[in-house]
Image (spheres, rainbow, N blue to C red):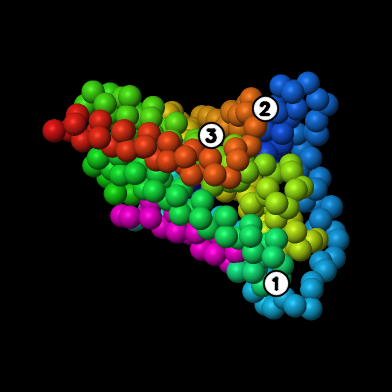
Amino acid sequence: MNTTLSAAAALGVVIVLAPGVIGVAARTRAALTHRRGTPVLQLYFDLFKLLRRGAVFSDATTWVFRFAPVAVVVTAILAALVVPLDGRASLFRFAGDPVALAYTFAFGRFFLVLAALDTGSSFEGMGASREVTFASLVEVGLFLSFATLAVLTHELSLSGMLEAPLARASASGSAPAVAMIAGSFFALLLAECARVPVDDPATHLELTMIHEVMVLDHSGPDLALILYAGALKLSVLGAVVISVLVPRANLPPAVAIAVLAGGLLLVGVGVGIVEASMARLRLPKVPLYLAGASALALFSLILALWSAA
């Protein structure tokens, strides 16, 4: 299996498995809190149900509201194209693609925020304000983590950074930096994907919601696209965490893709454990949480620079 075919197969696995990762997280949370919970495939059922329904639009909305769900899905897929999902190389590899990854997600968020403001709802405007505020803090930790990987691997593309970061760090004596990067990435993943402790996708209280309040007016296929895009974003960022901890460049393509699938399910379990073990943070505490994740990435960068000196 050549590199392009392997990368395309890994992309297909992520696209198909993404809703299942959300299901695993929900099932894990239910099991740990002694609840019956929903089936692992519940999001697949929900997406199918929503796709069969019609969408309702307010007279106050414009084309921005209708275009936002498409933009969110397209940007999530484009982001997946620059991540080496198979552990070798991405379908689109170039120097500086970590910046493209971050701002591709930001472009989708931009349209989702515009759609929330387009409704004229004060609640959705409040959620949009919180979303962009916390997203700006997430980017700091994300870029610090990528900077550490660049120092450790001497690469400027994600394919090079994630090919064998642990092996290169071990050779230079900075293996703890990789562990800190993985921890920072996972903490930022929870914030970027609107999961506990930053947000709670299961809540229905407008005054405490962030992401969910922005999509209150979406329905039918539009809501299905937004839900799927959120699942795909979690899986793509989860694949980055997997690549940091489990380099797969030297594995056979089929084994590397199988490790990816198993790793994504473990990411779902990890998300479920976090959601079952702690409550959602109060909004004033969220910046402190994000600052902690960024500080962890900063410490890893300092350690990497010290080891390289």
Nearer to us in this view, 8 or 35: 35
Disc 1 marks a residue whose amino acid type is Gly
Nearer to us in this view, 128 or 68: 128
Disc 3 marks a residue whose amino acid type is Leu
Q: For numbered disc 3, what is the local secondary structure?
A: helix
Question: Can you identify the residue that label 1 sits on?
Answer: 120
Describe residue 228's horizontal placement relative to residue 96 as left or right.
right
77 inside magenta stretch: no
> x, y (%) of residue 302?
25, 35
Residue located 44% across and 44% down the image: 84
Range of residues picked out in magenta: 95-113
Q: Residues within 10 Å of mark 1 (few under 14, many from 20)?
A: few
Residue 185 placement: quadrant = top left
Q: Which quarter of the rendering shows the C terminus?
A: top left
Residue located 44% across and 31% down the image: 183
Q: Earlier in the sequence, mark 2 or mark 3?
A: 3
100 inside magenta stretch: yes
> x, y (%) of residue 176?
33, 24
Which of the labelled discs sits on residue 302, or is there none? Answer: none
Query: Between tags 2 and 3, which lies in front?
Result: 2
Which of the labelled discs sits on residue 260, or is there none? Answer: 3
Q: Earlier in the sequence, mark 1 or mark 3?
A: 1
Question: Can you identify the residue that label 2 sits on?
Answer: 276
